[in-house]
Amino acid sequence: MNNDETGRQVFVYACDGIKQGLKALAVYYEKFKQKIGKRKDMKVQYKQAMKVEKGRMQLHEPYKGKQTVRQLMQHGQQLNSVDISTDKSLRTFNKIAKKHGVDFAVKKSPDNGKYLIFFKAKDNDVLASVFEEFSKKELNKKSKKESLVEKINQNEKSVKEMQNQLENSEKNLPEKGTKNAELPEL
């Protein structure tokens, strides 16, 4: 082999190496383009999602049901209030108001310990039916409690009568020394 042939072979090997390098570079470049394309797609999707979310926030529906006084005031309507005395009756009111779909807020009054219920003035008619149902339930609770008290009193009376009968029957019992004595009936 002479120098020309050796030079040509070296040149061919070098060209083959460069071709392989360029092919590898082209493959790498294609993968890189795909990654960038995916990132661009992700950015576009993210921007679209943000637009949708901003739209939802602009169309923000006001709170429903039980809420804070501040949230109720954000509705931009006049508020009315009513007192409720105990925590138990407040629970009953919450159930009934949720059933009727009334927007309301509860705040404890520091002066007298009662609960103030704030509601929209426009819900006055609905709240009238809520309070009607609420008062019926509260009256039923009180009548049930009274009937229990009456039952307890009746049971006490019957126990006292039984005790009196037992004492009377003990007095009428024959003494230990006598045989064949008849026992009194109870």
Image (cartoon, rainbow, N blue to C red):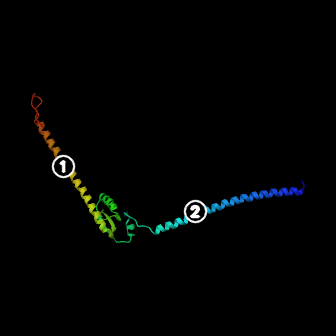
Furthest toward the right, the residue is: 2
Task: Specify the amino acid type for callout 2.
Answer: Met
**In the structure shown, which secondary structural element does the residue marked by tag 1 occupy?**
helix
What residue sits 49% from the left and 68% below the top?
54
> Does residue 93 appear left or right of residue 180 in this picture?
right
Q: CA distance from mark 1 to mark 2?
A: 77 Å
Tell me, yes or no, whether the two marked residues, 1 and 2, touch with CB atoms within 8 Å.
Answer: no
Would you identify the image quadrant in which residue 118 lies?
bottom left
The residue labelled by disc 2 is: 42
Figure quadrant of the C terminus: top left
> Does residue 42 appear left or right of residue 99 in this picture?
right
> Does residue 38 appear left or right of residue 19 in this picture?
left
Residue 72: x and y, percent? 38, 67
The residue labelled by disc 1 is: 153
**In the structure shown, which secondary structural element does the residue marked by tag 2 occupy?**
helix
What residue sits 66% from the left and 60% below the top?
32
Mark before the other along the chain sequence, 1 or 2 = 2
What residue sits 74% from the left and 59% below the top?
22
> Does residue 92 appear left or right of residue 176 in this picture?
right
**Other residues around mark 2 within 10 Å, as few (<14) / some (14–19) / many (≥20):** few
Q: Nearer the viewer, residue 3 or 147?
A: 3
Residue 85: x and y, percent? 28, 61
Residue 157: x and y, percent? 16, 46
Above-or-below relation of 159 to 42: above
Residue 122 visible? yes
Residue 5: x and y, percent? 87, 56
Would you identify the image quadrant in which residue 115 lies?
bottom left
Q: Nearer the viewer, residue 47 or 119?
A: 47
Residue 109 visible? no
Pair 1/2: label in front:
2
